[in-house]
Image (cartoon, rainbow, N blue to C red):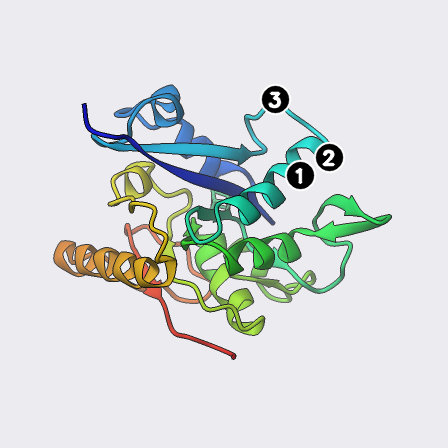
Amino acid sequence: MPDIVEIPAIWLQGSACTGCAVSLLNSFTPGASSLVLNELVPGRHISLRFIVTVMAGQGRQVVDVLKDTAARDKGGYVLVVEGSLPVGDPLFGTMGEENGREVPIAEHAVRLARNALAVVAMGTCAAFGGIPAGAPNPTEALSARDLLAREGVSVPVINIPGCPPHPDWLVGRPWPRRSTNWRARRCSTASAFTRRARAARISTRGDSQGSSATPGASMNSAARGP
Ligand code: SF4
């Protein structure tokens, strides 16, 4: 019997309505339970370790899951971002505390993205800012790509816009194998996604605020910063 490759995944929610998460849970084939319990495709199992909308755990224990995954599975996990990420004030959208300081969700996203195999920006809000980033954008909400560019994080960012996106646009992707050579793997993963996006002739970009009724995927693997 062939080995089953387990791919850790973290689903982080910023300025979101949770519609993207609910859309994922409406996945038909595979169904929601199969998404986390069975193989997504033969030989690939997603270990969805963190998704606030449905997980039972709370408090420090679940926030520690984020740290543990970033440390133990460095370069081998996928970070899925739902919603845009507010940076206008440290108190806009926080999750957990460190030394008495509330930690902004944008800070969690940057930390996790630094060690991720790839980042999936799920939904128009995460991909392009969406409704939370609409003028006058009082929380200064950014898309995942813009936040990571601002922070100099070099990681492939796969945009899957839609409000919400169809679950197949995520679960139908070629989930990668984990690799110890994570930088090389990130590049090949980016290429695989890009090839599929081009082959399917699906939208690769939306406008910065627009809802995207068209399934889309775009990739940003440009290196930034040192
Ligand atoms: S993209 Fe749409 S469904 Fe997803 S979080 Fe934003 S508003 Fe909600």
**Identity, as a three-letter code, of the amino acid under mark 3:** Ala
- Residue 55: image location, x then y, percent: 57, 26
Marks 2 and 1 close (CB-CB < 8 Å): yes
Residue hosting label 3: 56
Residue hosting label 1: 63
Q: State the residue at coordinates (29%, 45%).
A: 177
Mark 3 near ligand 1 (CB under 8 Å)? no
Residue closest to the eye, 85 or 191 = 191
Q: How many marks?
A: 3
Q: Does residue 129 appear to the left or right of 106 in the view shown?
A: left
- Residue 57: image location, x then y, percent: 64, 25
- Viewer can see residue 185: yes
Spatial separation of the CA atoms under disc 2 and disc 1: 5 Å
Q: Find residue 25 and report its image quarter.
A: top left
- Residue 47: image location, x then y, percent: 42, 32
- Residue 159: image location, x then y, percent: 37, 56
**Identity, as a three-letter code, of the amino acid under mark 2:** Arg
Residue 193 drawn above or below residue 26: below
- Viewer can see residue 129: no
Q: State the residue at coordinates (28%, 25%).
A: 30
- Numbered circle sitting on residue 60: 2
| Mark 2 surroundings within 10 Å by alpha-carbon count, few (fewer than 14), some (14 through 19), many (20 or more) | few
Spatial separation of the CA atoms under disc 3 and disc 2: 13 Å
**Identity, as a three-letter code, of the amino acid under mark 1:** Val
Residue closest to the eye, 5 or 116 = 5
Q: Quadrant of the N terminus?
A: top left
Spatial separation of the CA atoms under disc 1 and disc 3: 13 Å
| Mark 3 surroundings within 10 Å by alpha-carbon count, few (fewer than 14), some (14 through 19), many (20 or more) | few
Mark nearest the camera among 1 and 3 is 1
